[in-house]
Image: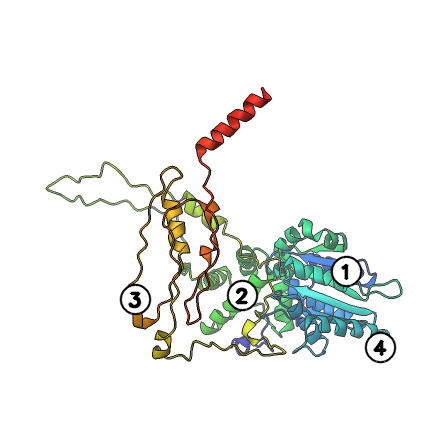
Amino acid sequence: MYEETFGLSHRPFPSVPSLVGYVETDSHLEAIETLLRCVRRDEGIGTLISAPGLGKSTIALRLQEELEDDFEVVRLNSGHCGSRRALLQAIAYELDLPCRGLEEGELRIQFAEYVQRLESRRMMGIVILADEADLLPIRLLEELRLLTNFASKDRSRVSVVLLGNMSLEERLASPYLTSFNQRVGARAYLQSLSTAEVAKYVRQQLVGAGAKLTIFDDSAIEAIAQRSQGVPRLVNQICDHALLLAALGDEMQLDADAVEEAWADLQRLPAPKRKIRTDNAHSTDSLIEFGSLEETKTDSSVEYPSVVRFEDRSQTEEQEEFPPEAVQEPEVELTFQNAANPFEEKFEKEEIVLDRFASLGDQEVRGIRRVVSPRNSEIAAFLVGSEDNPAEVEVVQPNYTQAEGMVVSRDFSTHSTGFSNWDDRDIIVIDSKEPRVEEPQHPKMPAPRRRTYRQLFSQLRRQHA
């Protein structure tokens, strides 16, 4: 949009990581050399840790450019992988391997076969560049460590480089990652740009885009370094927005005021007041004018409140200064299986159960003989009565007509004498047309009383005495 105004061939300050017009700083150069040495010499896992916006993704592009001739480079742009299967699918996609519809075990076998074929292609191995590795849960970091176990000829065929924020270093200090932490062979860090490096970066970006004039003066460079605090991402935002506002205002050179205006517009702050330059030799900035003050006459005196409300913002400021950390994903991978339906089970043999009474009608049910048992009345008599004074229980018999064919039991006594005198009366006898056979009567045994037990125990004590 502003390229034609300033005569530029392309946008000099892109919003995404790019190697077009790449400017190498001291910290970037040191980090690249450290990680390249770690990969080529097979020193172990490499880590690059820095604050947001300092160029980790750009370093990943530079590493990919340097290593792609000798290694198969897998660049994972995001750490939002929820499972091992998703991680292996992302790696397979970067290697142009089938990744859809495969289970975790199949993806792992496919990766192992691909590693074995690298020797025939004269490749040294695979390099996995995991950007935003601070978002990876512990189980996926362990999965990356297990991938480095593929080795041949005293060399690991899989190298891993992790790039993340400062929280990645805290994650690696976890006791669950002791084995992983022991394999880290190189640690690199990025620093923010100084004012001189900001000036070098801005001017080289403009020259690379074809700028012929000095667009940002020295005051603008200082304002950019101050507002961005040396973060390359913020430098790109401020410079790009300042060029856009300058093109809209037909300004060919930008000073500190233009940078402040662009920064205020990005942050949605009130626009700063620009200084008005005049041709007068004497400046009026240090003059103080004195004049008479108008006195307002009021009929009544002003009443001030005796208590002034004070708002305590200490807790609010503390919350704003230390915001809560983002919720991390669970470290344990949750797997769910569909519950088996017990009604889908098939049996070898099917058994058909018939209810013989389900087909009976009302008339047929009425013709069935009814059974009355004396057991219930005897148990009730035993529970209600005591041993000394047994109670008599009146047995209430239902009023059956003679035409209903009632089944009756034998006559029995309702006096409870305990369980010892139970006899064949417990058997239910159904009257039929056959002649009744008289059963022999057994003599009744009297139930023992408490007094009998006392006499027995007293005799035993006398004998032993």
Kindly identify the amino acid type of the residue bearing the numbered disc 2: Gln
In space, the residues marked 3 and 1 are separated at their CA atoms by: 109 Å
Q: What amino acid type should be assigned to the residue bearing mark 1?
A: Glu
Could you tell me residue 124's position as x and y percent?
83, 69
Counting residues from the start of the chain, the first of labels 2 and 1 encountered is: 1
Q: Nearer the viewer, mark 4 or mark 1?
A: 4
Residue neighbourhood size for the residue with mark 2, other residues' Cα within 10 Å, grouped as few (<14), some (14–19), many (≥20) = some
Would you name the residue on which mark 1 appears? 33
Residue tagged 4: 121
Q: Which class describes the residues within 10 Å of circle 1: few (<14), some (14-19), or many (20+)?
A: few
Crowd class of label 3 (few under 14; some 14 to 19; many from 20; radius 10 Å): few
Q: Nearer the viewer, mark 3 or mark 4?
A: 3
Q: CA distance from mark 4 to mark 1?
A: 26 Å
Give percent across and percent down for residue 205.
63, 68
The reply to whether callout 2 and callout 3 are in contact (CB within 8 Å) is: no
Residue tagged 3 = 400
Q: Nearer the viewer, mark 2 or mark 3?
A: 3
Residue 350 picture location, percent across and down: 58, 79
In the image, residue 277 above or below residue 123: above
| SS class, disc 3 | loop
- Identify the residue at the far left of this view: 299
